[in-house]
């Protein structure tokens, strides 16, 4: 199967996959602990002293790779988002601001964490992340595609994309941009990307789907494999290196609906 076929299979069965994740014993324990205890914390220090709560939230906000950066996270949460000069508002990666805004320790002393709808939203996010991680076991590109699909509605500029290594990987792959381009002057790189794709199109579900399909096809072209041909050794979480698979290249079949669109895009 190709990446696109894998992705479509996961998408068609999203509810079933989510339920499978929720029913796992380890996930059930994590969710039960979180829902029973998150409403008890009122300060950043209380929150961060409870390692189970802290790790649950970090993972839910796609910040699992930053779990050991406690000094940074404490400052982000203590400063909140109201002050335009707060650290979260000055960071290029919007995930930090999103977490600080939802937890709202600075603004509400954690009162929002007593609201069932807020707690449930964090749990749902946690499950989504777990489901994406599970998809990676079959095909690392599927996790990238699902993550991009989930984050796309919140993307407002290319700087946000370039600040997030997973989002950047999807865009670079879809537009056939070499990894070395990340070493260019940031403003020049953004200008070049703008000539290739209108970021506003990511708000259009149909255009977003086409973009993700293009990523899926290009990923297989660049990596020379189809799903299931070899074992995966992935570093998708940190995105410090290109996603790849070891083993012999395989002959892959690209979805015909995507093939022609690949030919129309100029090289970077």
Image (tube, rainbow, N blue to C red):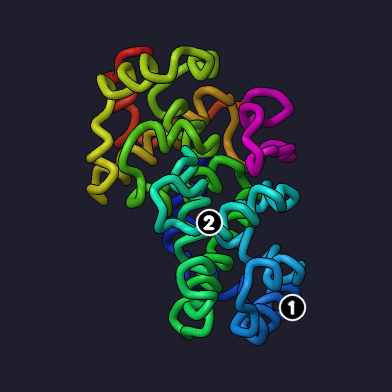
Horizontal and vertical percent position of residue 194: 28, 24
Can residue 254 be seen here? no
Can residue 40 be seen here? yes
Circle count: 2
State which quarter of the image contains the N terminus: top right
Horizontal and vertical percent position of residue 247: 73, 27
Horizontal and vertical percent position of residue 148: 44, 45
Q: Secondary structure at mark 2?
A: helix
In the drawing, what numbered circle is on residue 25?
1
Bounds of the magenta span? 229-249
Nearer to us: label 1 or label 2: 2
Mark 1 or 2 closer to N-term? 1
183 or 99, nearer to the observer: 99
177 or 116, nearer to the observer: 116
In the drawing, what numbered circle is on residue 192?
none
Q: CA distance from mark 1 to mark 2?
A: 36 Å
């Amino acid at each position: 199967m190709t990446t696109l076929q894998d992705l479509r299979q996961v998408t068609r069965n999203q509810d079933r996959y989510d339920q499978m994740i929720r029913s796992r014993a380890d996930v059930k324990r994590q969710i039960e602990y979180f829902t029973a205890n998150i409403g008890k914390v009122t300060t950043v220090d209380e929150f961060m002293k409870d390692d189970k709560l802290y790790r649950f939230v970090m993972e839910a906000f796609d910040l699992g790779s930053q779990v050991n950066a406690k000094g940074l996270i404490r400052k982000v949460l203590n400063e909140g988002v109201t002050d335009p000069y707060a650290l979260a508002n000055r960071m290029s990666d919007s995930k930090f601001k999103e977490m600080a805004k939802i937890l709202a320790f600075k603004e509400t002393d954690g009162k929002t964490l007593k609201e069932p709808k807020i707690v449930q939203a964090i749990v749902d996010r946690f499950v989504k992340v777990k489901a994406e991680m599970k998809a990676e076991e079959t095909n690392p590109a599927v996790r990238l595609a699902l993550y991009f699909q989930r984050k796309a509605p919140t993307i407002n500029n290319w700087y946000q994309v370039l600040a997030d290594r997973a989002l950047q990987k999807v865009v670079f792959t879809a537009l056939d941009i070499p990894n070395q381009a990340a070493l260019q002057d940031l403003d020049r790189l953004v200008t070049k990307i703008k000539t290739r794709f209108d970021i506003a199109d990511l708000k259009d579900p149909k255009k977003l789907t086409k973009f993700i399909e293009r990523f899926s096809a290009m990923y297989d072209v660049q990596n020379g494999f189809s799903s299931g041909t070899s074992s995966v050794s992935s570093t998708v979480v940190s995105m410090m290196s290109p996603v790849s698979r070891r083993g012999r290249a395989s002959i892959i079949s690209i979805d015909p609906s995507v093939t022609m669109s690949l030919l129309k895009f100029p090289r970077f």
